Image (tube, helix red, strand yellow):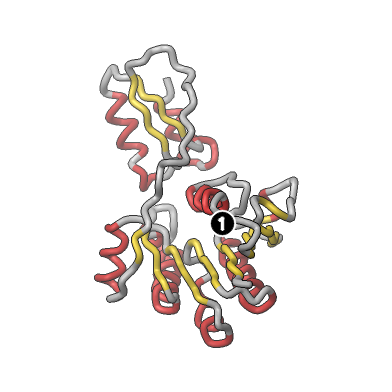
């Protein structure tokens, strides 16, 4: 039986971001004949299901984000390659990429890595974190059998930086469910994103603050100092 392990997310059911939503939607295409394991953070789920949408869930007792994402992903990768002996590893992000050379050396698993965006360029990281993430990106590209980019810009960057062709698989929107927003005025603009400086949040808010246009901005405002600052400054 061909085994696939999915590594690098908080887990499913999706409760965090784009990668989690991606996995949740991939599992909609799964059937009982496919053996899929999704690695999940036990820190993020009070109810720890053993199965979800015909996939097995394996919990790692670490946070999937922040500095713990490194041992979280490495632990997941080693378990998938050497304990579960998965035939294919779908790796979302580059946090655990340092162990990929060992996996290539001692395992026959095929490694498919979605490197995400240019994480090492994000302003929230200090210089040492940026260097680590850039190095991890380099290792991920070098030791993966397939590199996945979620847009052509990332694919062009990988080609120019590493001389490696990547597969472009853009995020779809067919899974979206539109719900009615609690705003009475139909004449408004809508923004929806994770509240990070790189998403031009402050630029959008500053621009709309100079107009009379109503902006409905949906995001995780209370999850960071930046989000709280922006919310307090521009909320009206």
Please report the residue visible at 66 percent of the width from the left and 49 percent of the height from the top. Answer: 44
Q: Quadrant of residue 139?
A: bottom left
Q: Position of residue 235 (x, y in %)?
A: 43, 24
Count of numbered labels shown in the rendering: 1
**Farthest bottom residue?**
105
On-image quarter of the C terminus = top left
**Farthest top residue?**
184
Residue at which label 1 appears:
9
Q: Nearer the viewer, residue 80 or 94?
A: 80
Please report the residue visible at 40 percent of the width from the left and 73 percent of the height from the top. Answer: 141
Q: Quadrant of residue 155?
A: bottom left
The crowd level at tag 1 (other Cα within 10 Å; few <14, some 14-19, many 20+) is: many
Q: Position of residue 213 (x, y in %)?
A: 30, 19
Q: From the viewer's perspective, is 165 left or right of 86?
A: left
**Farthest front residue?**
33
Q: Position of residue 59 (x, y in %)?
A: 70, 59
Please report the residue visible at 68 percent of the width from the left and 58 percent of the height from the top. Answer: 57
Q: From the viewer's perspective, is 152 left or right of 77?
A: left
Q: Nearer the viewer, residue 29 or 38?
A: 29
Residue 57, placed above or below residue 75? above
Q: From the viewer's perspective, is 177 left or right of 11?
A: left
């Amino acid at each position: 039986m061909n085994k696939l392990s999915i590594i690098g997310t908080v887990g499913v059911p999706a409760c965090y971001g784009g990668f989690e939503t991606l996995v949740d939607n991939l599992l909609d295409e799964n059937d009982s004949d496919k053996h899929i394991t999704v690695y999940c953070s036990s820190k993020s789920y009070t109810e720890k299901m053993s199965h979800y949408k015909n996939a097995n869930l394996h919990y790692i007792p670490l946070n999937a984000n922040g500095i713990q994402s490194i041992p979280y992903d490495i632990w997941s990768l080693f378990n998938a390659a050497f304990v579960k002996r998965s035939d294919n590893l779908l790796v979302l992000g580059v946090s655990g990429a340092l162990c990929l050379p060992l996996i290539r050396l001692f395992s026959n698993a095929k490694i498919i890595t979605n490197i995400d965006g240019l994480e090492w360029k994000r302003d929230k990281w200090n210089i040492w974190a940026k260097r680590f993430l850039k190095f991890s990106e380099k290792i991920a590209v070098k030791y993966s059998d397939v590199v996945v980019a979620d847009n052509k810009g990332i694919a062009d960057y990988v080609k120019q930086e590493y001389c490696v062709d990547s597969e472009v698989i853009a995020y779809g929107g067919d899974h979206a469910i539109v719900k009615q927003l609690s705003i009475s005025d139909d004449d408004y603009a809508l923004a929806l994103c994770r509240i990070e400086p790189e998403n031009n949040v402050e630029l959008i808010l500053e621009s709309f603050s100079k107009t009379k246009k109503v902006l409905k901005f949906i995001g995780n405002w209370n999850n960071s100092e930046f989000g709280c600052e922006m919310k307090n400054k521009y909320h009206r």
